[in-house]
Image (cartoon, rainbow, N blue to C red):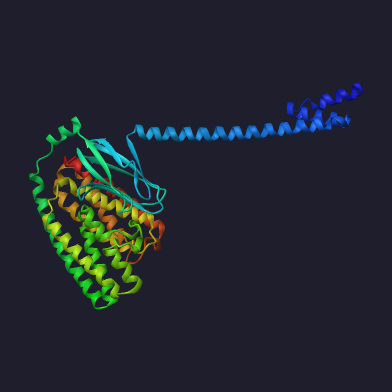
Amino acid sequence: MSESSQTRGEKKNAGQSPNAQHAANAAANAAANPDAAPAAGKTMWVLLVAAALLVVVGLVAFYMATRFARQAHESHEAGAGVITVNVGAHECTPAELTVPAGLSTFRIVNTSDRAVEWEILDGVMVIEERENIAPAFAQTLSVQLSPGDYDITCGLLSNPRGRLHVTPTAQSEQASKAAPSMTDFVGPLSEYRVYLTLQSMSLVTAVQTLDHAIASGDAAAAKTAYADAHAVYMHLSPIADLFSDLDKKLDAPADFFDKREKDPGFTGFHRVQYGLYASGADASLAAPSQQLLKDTQALRQRMDDLSVQPKQLAVAAARRVDLIATAIKAGNEQPHASMSPSDVAPALEGVGEIVGLLKPLLQQSNPALMSALNADLDGGTAQAKKTFDNASADATFATFDAGQREQLAARLGTLANDLRKINSSLGLN
């Protein structure tokens, strides 16, 4: 090569990267020396492999960075005291937990293929729960726990139960000594017991009417009676929810059972609803209807014998409102789900009964909270009646406007948060 041509080549390559210059020189050498072409090809192959390795290294670095970020987030959650529980198809992990008395926060993750619930139980009484957790989703539950041992339901009702051990602390012992006098709560609790007794009597009468219509084969009358009876049950629902065994018999949806609608454990209102709207008031509903009547009579007896603690009222009301908001947001397409559009207003009326009984006490201790509760409850009930006006007992939330449902669910979320402030305002925590 002449000196002038070599100089021109160097100037041409001066603005190129080292790899590009190397490739260009290799190509030029190959053209000038055909015998060197295989060596040039080998060089190009090496460069391509090196580039591919760089891409792999970059992907691995990205994966590791993402993993470390996720671990850091989980560590932060753990440091903040959040306890994660994974609810699978047949069990929850961990199935045994130990926490100190006081406020504990649980993050319940559904790792199964259907909606599940997670409850903390003291015997048959529900302390706190989260229901209708969708597959691959999580819900958070915060609860004030007293020392003792509790059961945990883990998804399907046929699954084995877990255990929760709550150990005493200096703060919990001091709080038990500083509990407020119960004298002020005698009036509200007595009034509420009368309300529960009257409503449970009305429930038995309504279910008897439903059973008679089914026995007579009158499908139209049975559908009307079903809607009336379930509305009464919704009035009782904040306290009926406390009886885990009876509530499951009376109001659990098919999804909570292993074989869904075909499961022999699927009984109660939604079993009757399922049969009534699928095939009418035929003979197949006779046994489920009789079982429903028997279970409502058992609930009435429980209500007569119940000794309600003051702090249970606000907690039960908040939990019921949470369940309503969750069902509205989920937009269930299943007609016999745990909550239907026609159930929302009567359930809020049942919550309103509790708020009304506590009003005189709250008006003295926290009038601003009382005003907020009145606004939340009145506005939420009015909006529910307007949104789900004339909804039939087999209607689903999915058939109603998503924007209106989201707005109502947000309003009820605010109501639930305000209800949870009642106990601290009354010195009941």
Quarter of the image for the C terminus: give it: top left
Left or right position of 37 against 339: right
Residue 265 can be seen in this image: yes
Name the residue nearer the viewer: 292 or 198: 292
Q: Is residue 17 visible?
A: no
Q: Looking at the picture, how far across and down is residue 15, in whole percent?
A: 76, 27
Q: Which quarter of the figure has residue 290?
A: bottom left
Please give the name of the residue rendered at 21% of the width and 44% of the height, measured from the top-left corner: 422
In this rendered view, identify the residue nearer to me: 26 or 17. Answer: 26
Query: Outermost residue toward the left?
Result: 183
- At horizontal 31% and vertical 42% (from top left) the residue drawn is 95
Q: Is residue 231 above or below residue 371?
A: below
Q: Taking 341 as reference, is 153 above or below it? A: above
Q: Is residue 360 left or right of residue 87?
A: left
Residue 169 position, x and y percent, is 20, 31
Q: Residue furthest right?
A: 2
Task: Residue 86 in the image: state x and y as whole percent.
Answer: 37, 44
The residue sitting at the top extreme is 3
Using residue 323 as the reference point, say whether residue 306 is left or right of it: left
Closer to us: 43 or 174: 43
161 up-or-down from 240: above or below: above
Q: Quadrant of the N terminus?
A: top right
